[in-house]
């Protein structure tokens, strides 16, 4: 357990450092813009490309794994959504953000660096696949449900326009582009020239520290508010039910690769992603609640993730 804590605590220490910096220096959120550009467009895509390109091509087309993990995320979304709509009588637009907050884990900023730290470089391959398909699901499902909720009030956009915007947001995302390029490089056994490879290696080493510090700064700028009856459901779904769903579905699929199983469970146990707040702000729904979900689940994960990883590494879970 001490080894796991020695790996995990520095990562959460980076988040804490960013949180403290936000509280001390009180700079405007716009100050994060350039750091986020480096993370999203250069550092994490570099890490994704190098890892996926180095993986055996046959490991990148295991659809049962993708189906199981994506279905687990979908169920973690749809259950709180249905609860909000039919039990709490929440509007569809707000319920969609409830579902996003309960299912959209921090698979980019936290998931990719932590998977590599806990399970080694090969873990970045399943982590990148989970990221891509989870993002494709969230960036499709949430806008469509929000549009459905607005349909009676706003006829200015056709469904074709909505689908076009959603498709562009998915296929142009830097992480997804990097994964596609990595898959092509793996298929054709392509290695970039030393000059390009050196740049990619340098950027990939900056991915983890930069992303986690930026996450801490973002959390430090949020406040705890907007908590209602739905909030315990969101937190419980994200932190506890989502990993159980992933485990059950992978078991039903007969998946028997311990590394990929471990990465899938860790990724499902991650706290709510900052993107939940971004989507809430974009649609002006449940903004404070999404922010609180990110903050509370991140604090909880500082205790649950090391325990989960310890259980995975010591064989307490029998796959």
Image (cartoon, helix red, strand yellow):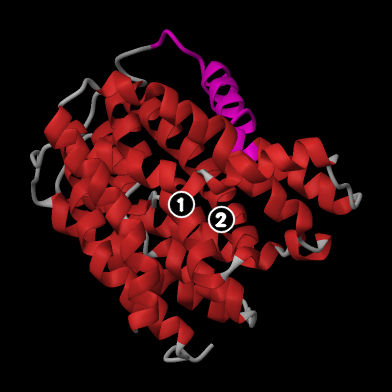
Label 2 Cα crowd, 10 Å radius (few <14 / some 14-19 / many 20+): many
Closest to the observer, 312 or 164: 312
Relative placement, left or right, of 136 versus 103 is right
Secondary structure at badge 1 equals helix
Tell me if label 2 and label 1 are in contact, CB under 8 Å: yes
- The answer to whether residue 162 is above or below residue 131 is above
Q: Is residue 156 magenta?
A: yes
Which quadrant of the structure image shows residue 281? top left
Q: Is residue 56 visible?
A: yes
Residue nearest the viewer, comparing 155 with 286: 286
The correct choice, above or below, for 192 with respect to 313 in the image is above
Examine the image and state in which quarter residue 213 appears: top left
The image quadrant where one finds the C terminus is: bottom right
Question: Percent position (x, y) of residue 284?
Answer: 24, 23
Q: Name the residue rendered at 88%, 47% in the picture.
A: 190
Residue 123, given in percent of the width and then of the height, sits at 60, 65
Q: What's the magenta region? A: 155-176
Asked if residue 211 is among those painted magenta in the image, a careful observer would answer no
What numbered label is drawn on residue 107? 1
Q: Helix or strand or loop: what does disc 2 sit on? A: helix
């Amino acid at each position: 357990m001490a080894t796991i804590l020695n790996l995990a605590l520095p990562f959460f220490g980076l988040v804490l450092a960013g949180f403290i910096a936000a509280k001390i220096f009180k700079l405007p959120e716009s100050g994060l813009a350039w750091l986020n550009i480096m993370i999203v467009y250069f550092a994490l895509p570099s890490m994704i490309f190098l890892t996926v390109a180095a993986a055996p091509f046959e490991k990148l087309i295991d659809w049962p794994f993708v189906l199981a993990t994506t279905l687990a995320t979908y169920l973690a979304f749809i259950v709180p959504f249905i609860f909000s709509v039919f039990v709490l009588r929440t509007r569809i637009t707000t319920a969609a953000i409830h579902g996003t907050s309960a299912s959209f884990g921090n698979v980019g900023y936290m998931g990719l660096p932590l998977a590599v730290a806990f399970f080694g470089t090969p873990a970045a391959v399943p982590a990148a696949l989970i990221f891509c398909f989870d993002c494709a699901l969230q960036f499709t499902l949430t806008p469509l449900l929000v549009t459905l909720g607005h349909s009676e009030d706003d006829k200015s956009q056709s469904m074709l326009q909505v689908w076009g915007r959603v498709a562009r947001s998915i296929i142009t995302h830097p992480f997804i582009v990097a994964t596609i390029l990595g898959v092509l490089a793996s298929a054709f056994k392509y290695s970039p020239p030393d000059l390009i490879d050196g740049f990619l290696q340098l950027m990939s080493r900056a991915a983890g520290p930069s992303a986690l510090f930026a996450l801490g700064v973002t959390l430090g700028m949020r406040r705890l508010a907007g908590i209602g009856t739905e909030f315990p459901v969101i937190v419980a779904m994200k932190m506890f039910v989502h990993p159980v769903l992933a485990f059950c579905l992978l078991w039903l699929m007969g998946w028997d690769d311990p590394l990929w199983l471990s990465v899938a469970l860790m990724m499902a146990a991650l706290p709510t992603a900052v993107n939940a707040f971004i989507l809430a702000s974009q649609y002006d729904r449940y903004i404070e609640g999404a922010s609180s979900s990110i903050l509370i689940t991140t604090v909880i994960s500082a205790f649950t993730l090391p325990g989960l990883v310890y259980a995975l590494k010591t064989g307490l879970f029998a796959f």
